[in-house]
Image: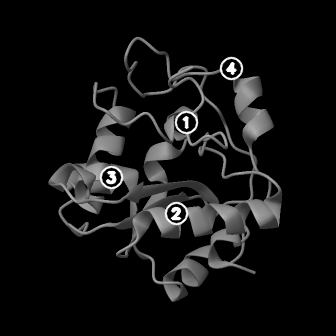
Amino acid sequence: MSAIACAAGSDCIATLRAAGFEGFVSARDLRREDCAGVPRDTGVYVMVRESGAAPRFNPRGTAAFWRGMDPNVKSEALAERWVAGACVLYVGRARGPGVRSLLQQRIKRWLRFGEGRNVAHWGGRYVWQLADAYALPIAWKPCADAAGEEAALLAAFEQAYGAPPFANLRHESGVEEGEGE
């Protein structure tokens, strides 16, 4: 089984660490520290939830509207997307080369978006409707080919679970739901 397909309730963090992921810092602490410990490299990042307990969804999340689009969906839609038994909720990438496309800045933007700030980061928005979103750990893995690594991680996850991670909303075209449609 791939590290990305580790099960909630198992030692998911140890499995991801063995696969090269580091960090595992809560979203709350990363924001408080302004992502100071996150490398300024290309790579991939994940949000994990080790608990196998059913999630609690907030009717309105903390994420900002972006380009006039509401990031919130009904709790029923979130429940339908939930991948039971999975530990990984979201896989993102920072493919470089500019500073805005490195791990530290991508994660920082994602967290700012989750706080309701209007920044260019629409991906992973469903996590901000989870009641425990800010307590969940985020980990990263520096790598040269972030796009290739992300694609491999998503493919391994889908092979194991038959669906993408909860907050990865890409269609086969590579365009996120609600974006460019």
Q: Nearer the viewer, mark 4 or mark 1?
A: 1
Q: Is residue 155 left or right of residue 151?
A: right
Residue marked by disc 3 = 107
Name the N-terminal-most of marks 2 and 1: 2
Above or below: residue 52 compared with residue 39: above
Name the N-terminal-most of marks 4 and 2: 4
Rounded to the nearest angstrom, the CA distance separating label 1 from label 3 is: 20 Å
Residue 87 visible, this angle: no
Residue marked by disc 1 = 175
Instruction: Name the residue type under label 2.
Output: Glu
Q: CB of mark 2 within 8 Å of CB of mark 1?
A: no
The residue shown at (25%, 69%) is: 41
Rounded to the nearest angstrom, the CA distance separating label 2 from label 1 is: 15 Å
Above or below: residue 145 compared with residue 85: below
Rounded to the nearest angstrom, the CA distance separating label 4 from label 3 is: 25 Å
Query: Crowding near pointer 3: few (<14 within 10 Å), some, many (20+)?
Result: many
Residue marked by disc 2 = 150
Instruction: Name the residue type under label 4.
Output: Lys
Instruction: Name the residue type under label 1.
Output: Val
The residue shown at (76%, 50%) is: 83
SS of the residue under disc 4: loop
SS of the residue under disc 3: helix
**Residue 135 point in image, percent of width and height:** 46, 52
